[in-house]
């Protein structure tokens, strides 16, 4: 069974959306966050149809945040176990 990442990391997901929206504006008309994936309906600015850029940036930001958390968790575990 895989981890329900979007739901368990909802604050990181919100921050990722904020980050992307400040650089590439869009309006969220609807968004559903499910345990293993997300559905979204966006309205992009007139003349801008690059939804794939926004998804790529959102996924990238979110994934990098997950990597930092995993490394930090691993480091904390190693310190707790006395492993160098």
Image (cartoon, rainbow, N blue to C red):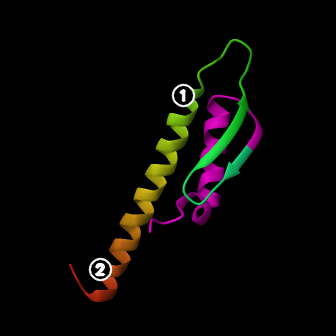
Q: Residue at x 59, y 21 (%)?
A: 50
Q: Position of residue 3 (x, y in %)?
A: 48, 66
Q: Residue 54 versus residue 24: which sits nearer the camera?
A: 54
Q: Quadrant of the C terminus?
A: bottom left
Magenta region's main secondary structure?
helix
38 versus 75 height, above or below: above
Residue at the spot of label 2: 78
- The residue tagged with tag 1: helix, strand or loop? helix
Q: Is residue 72 magenta?
A: no
Question: From the viewer's perspective, is the residue at label 2 or at label 1 nearer?
Answer: 1
Residue that protrudes farthest toward the left in the picture: 84
Q: Which residues are magenta?
A: 1-30
- The residue tagged with tag 2: helix, strand or loop? helix
State how many labels appear.
2
Disc 2 to disc 1, C-alpha distance: 38 Å
Q: Residue 57 versus residue 80: which sits nearer the camera?
A: 57
Rendered image: mark on residue 9: none
Q: Quadrant of the N terminus?
A: bottom left
Q: Is residue 10 magenta?
A: yes
Q: Residue at x 56, y 51 (%)?
A: 37
Ranked by sequence position, the earlier of labels 2 and 1 is: 1
- Residue 70 position by quadrant: bottom left
46 versus 16 height, above or below: above
- Residue 72 position by quadrant: bottom left
Q: Position of residue 81 (x, y in %)?
A: 29, 88
Q: Are marks 2 and 1 in contact (CB under 8 Å)?
A: no
Residue at the spot of label 1: 52
Q: Residues within 10 Å of mark 2 (few under 14, many from 20)?
A: few
Instruction: Classify residue 11 as left or right of residue 61.
Output: right
Residue that protrudes farthest toward the right in the picture: 29
Residue that protrudes farthest toward the top in the picture: 47
Instruction: Classify residue 73 as left or right of residue 5.
Output: left
């Amino acid at each position: 069974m895989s981890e329900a990442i979007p739901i368990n990391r909802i604050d990181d997901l919100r921050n990722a959306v904020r980050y992307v929206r400040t650089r590439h504006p869009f309006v969220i008309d609807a968004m559903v966050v499910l345990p293993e994936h997300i559905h979204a309906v966006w309205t992009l600015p007139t003349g801008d149809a690059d939804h794939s850029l926004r998804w790529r940036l959102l996924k990238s930001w979110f994934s990098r945040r997950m990597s930092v958390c995993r490394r930090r968790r691993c480091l904390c575990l190693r310190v707790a176990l006395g492993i160098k």
